[in-house]
Image (cartoon, rainbow, N blue to C red):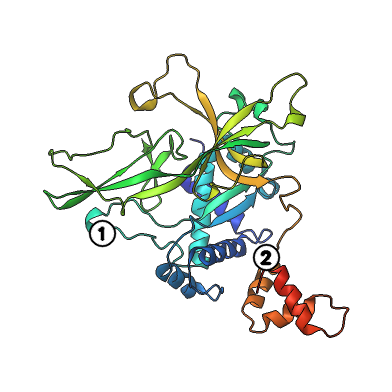
Amino acid sequence: MANSLAELRTRYDDFLRHERFNYPERIATAIDDYIQRSTSGGDSSTGGTNKAASSLANGPITSATPRLRVPLSELRSYDARLSNQLINDPLRHLRALEFAAHDIAMEERPGYDKSRSAISSSASTNESSDVRIRVALGGPTSTSHPLNPRDLGSSTLRTLVCVEGVAVKVSGVKPKIVTSVHYCPATNKHERRNYVDATDPQLGLPLVDSTGVELPDKIVGLTGSSYPTMDQAGHVLETEYGLSHYKDYQTVTLQEMPERAPMGQLPRSIELIMENELCDKLKPGDRCRVVGTHRALASNSGPGGQGSTSGVFKTVVLVNDVQLIGRDSNTGLVFTMRDVRTIRQLSQRSDILDVLGRSVCPSIHGHSVIKKALALQLLSGV
């Protein structure tokens, strides 16, 4: 292993703290947006770290996790070698980048990672169900144009790819079990079991303990698909569905754009794996740009789902970021950090309707009531 988690974490921490990119403020803004979306009835202002912690503690959490967007072009301009290493080994580098972003987030907004569901002490383990900031990598992955599904082959496996296409098939969003909690009436104890399948981003990486230290001698592997019904002593287990941890899961078929397919050939497609907050981002017919890891999945014929008789494996893209392209994507609308701060400051003013009314047709004097009515109509207000 060329770099350990601690070394990569330090390098990405230096990148995020570089004054040229202003990532600490971006991280704070991402967390504030997450709190505003996730809590109902909480204070939507950005009035400090205590409010952020209290909002998460008091309001029900409905959103998945805060997301920080990191364009690969910025990382490439800071350290081209580090950018190439991320593209060639994305899952390990992305984990280190998210650890570094989490450290900065704890400094900017202490308490943002409050656990969404408290599991009783009898069921507690070293595993944490806390909220952690995620990093969305913005493509393209190189200076050249994005790839088509036809361009994905054996040379792109286990690398970060940027693919453009049309979503032709979108499955429903289903809950996928991550950690199950079981109660044994005979012993009055709880048990937990974690599940790792072939689409898990942590598969094949060294295990990380609760303190964030990498354990090189322990590798994250596939777990069995059987659901426990009895403990080791033969006692019956009851599943605690309310204490179990799930994540949203969805599959999307991305097809090559018809105008980019070679003449006389049918467009090719690739399956996308969408999880958590990325689910339901696409609908059939959407043109999109996807950044993710190209991975091969083994068949389920052998022990642990790793059996294969032909040596041919299904390939998917583990999606990290999705962007709509085309006329309906609103790609020309870009908000800076200053714009976000100004909008939030305006939302706290008691005379916000008067401000919006004066902004409608400012060259026409008077008619304030009509201007307010037009502003409410534009904002779908009554």
User: CA gap, disc 1 to disc 2?
Assistant: 40 Å
Q: Position of residue 123 (x, y in %)?
A: 24, 53
Tell me which amino acid carries mark 2: Met
Is disc 2 surrounded by few (<14), some (14 to 19) or many (20+) residues within 10 Å?
few
Instruction: Give the quarter of the image for residue 242.
Output: bottom left
Badge 1 is on which residue? 120
**Mark closer to the chain start, 1 or 2:** 1
Q: Residue at x 72, y 58 (%)?
A: 334
In this rendered view, identify the residue nearer to me: 236 or 336. 236
Badge 2 is on which residue? 337
In this rendered view, identify the residue nearer to me: 205 or 129. 129
Q: Is residue 349 above or below residue 26?
A: below
Tell me which amino acid carries mark 1: Ser
- Element on which disc 1 rests: loop
- Element on which disc 2 rests: helix
Q: Nearer the viewer, mark 1 or mark 2?
A: 1
Q: Position of residue 144 (x, y in %)?
A: 74, 36
In this rendered view, identify the residue nearer to me: 171 or 317. 171
Q: Residue at x 74, y 58 (%)?
A: 333
Q: Is residue 290 above or below residue 127?
A: above
